[in-house]
Image (cartoon, helix red, strand yellow):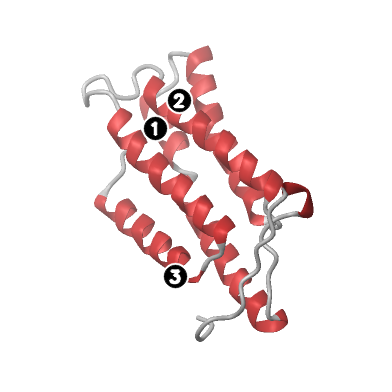
Amino acid sequence: MLPTPVYYSFLLACCAYVALRGAAPEKIGAAIILVGSILSTVALTSPARRFTSVEVGVFLVDVAALLALLGLSLRAERFWPLWVTALQFIATAAHAVKFIDSNLIRAVYAIVMGLWTYPVLLIIVFGTWNHQRRLARFGVDKSWSSSSGRSETRPPTGPIV
């Protein structure tokens, strides 16, 4: 599945919302997906060879994003990073399937690689919305687990959207 103008519009809209309303974990999660999307687009092979074999560059970007999201999941005082990490794992596993079976249909490989980015973005937006709800309800929302060595809370700012 190729990144399209529709995808990049959706990506930018989600990232803008997260940048305006999210705390550090949401912003970091959105940044990981934004950078990963850009690097994956750059790493794609030429159109004639695209998805005929493992997209090694995209695989490396996906592994890096998976590790970054896993680190975020372990440190953030949020539940949504676990879901995002699991979906990133599925997308990364598509490369492993292509490594094992090079006859995997190009379209299937492309779809499984890219399908998960839409729900990932929606989950981060939902996490941001929940962050805003907790701020409105409690006045603070702890961003990092006590074992992470970080402590950040934000007071509510502006109307809850």
Cα separation, mark 3 vs mark 1, equals 32 Å
- Please rate how many residues cluster around mark 1, counting C-alpha atoms within 10 Å: few if below 14, some from 14 to 19, many from 20: some
Report whether residue 127 is seen: yes
- The answer to whether 113 appears left or right of 78 in the picture is left
Mark 2 or mark 1: which comes first in sequence? 2
Residue drawn at point x = 61 percent, y = 72 percent: 154
Q: Which residue lies under the disc numbered 3?
A: 20
Find residue 81 and report its horizontal and vertical position in percent: 63, 50
- Residue 3 is labelled as none
Residue 11 sits in quarter: bottom left
Q: Amino acid at mark 3?
A: Leu
- The answer to whether 123 appears left or right of 8 in the picture is right
Find residue 71 and report its horizontal and vertical position in percent: 63, 40
- Dot 1 falls on a residue whose secondary structure is helix
Q: Amino acid at mark 1?
A: Ala
Residue drawn at point x = 29 percent, y = 24 percent: 50
Q: How many marks?
A: 3
- The answer to whether 41 appears left or right of 129 in the picture is left
- Residue 110 is labelled as 1
Find residue 92 and report its horizontal and vertical position in percent: 53, 30
Residue drawn at point x = 50 percent, y = 71 percent: 21
- Dot 2 falls on a residue whose secondary structure is helix
Mark 3 or mark 2: which comes first in sequence? 3
Find residue 131 and report its horizontal and vertical position in percent: 62, 70
Report whether residue 55 is seen: no
Tell me: residue 10, above or below residue 44: below
Q: Which mark's residue is nearer the viewer, 2 or 1?
A: 2
- Dot 3 falls on a residue whose secondary structure is helix
Question: Could you tell me which quadrant the N terminus lies in?
Answer: top left
- Residue 60 is labelled as 2
